[in-house]
Amino acid sequence: LARRPGWVYSRYEIVNGVRGEETIVTDRSVDVQIVGLRKKLGAAGKYIETVRGVGYRFKDK
């Protein structure tokens, strides 16, 4: 996400980037992992934005 700030990544693109195409993961699994990532990032977690019905993006500001 941080490599291309502002670019919206679908859940499918996120899974492919992390695990590869052969991995079967539900959309909800990605959502749960994003929640955990936001918690670990603390205040910086606010920079991961949900784009409803599409996926996620990293806000650079």
Image (tube, rainbow, N blue to C red):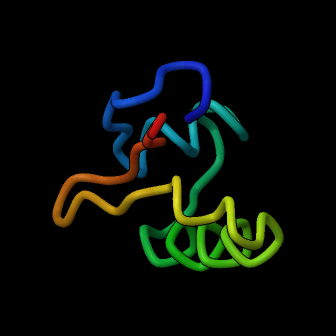
Looking at the image, the residue that sits furthest to the front is 61
- Return the residue nearer the eye: 59 or 23: 59
Which quadrant of the figure contains the C terminus? top left
Q: Is residue 42 left or right of residue 32?
A: right
Q: Residue at x 34, y 44 (%)?
A: 10
Tell me which corner region of the image, top left, top right, bottom left or bottom right, holds residue 25: bottom right
Q: Residue furthest left?
A: 53
In the displayed structure, would residue 29 be above or below residue 16? below
- The image shows residue 26 at horizontal and vertical percentages of 48, 69
Quadrant assignment for the N terminus: top right
Q: Quadrant of residue 43?
A: bottom right
Q: Specify whether 15 is left or right of 55.
A: right
Report the residue that reaches farthest toward the right.
Answer: 40
Picture coordinates of residue 6 (x, y %)?
35, 31
- Image quadrant of residue 33? bottom right
Along the line of sight, which residue is nearer the eye, 50 or 31? 50
Residue located 72% across and 66% down the image = 37
Image point 57% across, 74% down: which residue? Answer: 29
Task: Count up the numbered dots.
Answer: 0
In the foreground, 37 or 18: 37
Q: Looking at the image, is 36 positioned above or below residue 57? A: below
Q: Is residue 17 above or below residue 54?
A: above
Residue 35 coordinates in the image, percent (x, y): 61, 77
Please state the horizontal and vertical placement of residue 34, each as a whole percent of the image. Answer: 60, 67
Q: Residue drawn 46% across and 78% down?
A: 28
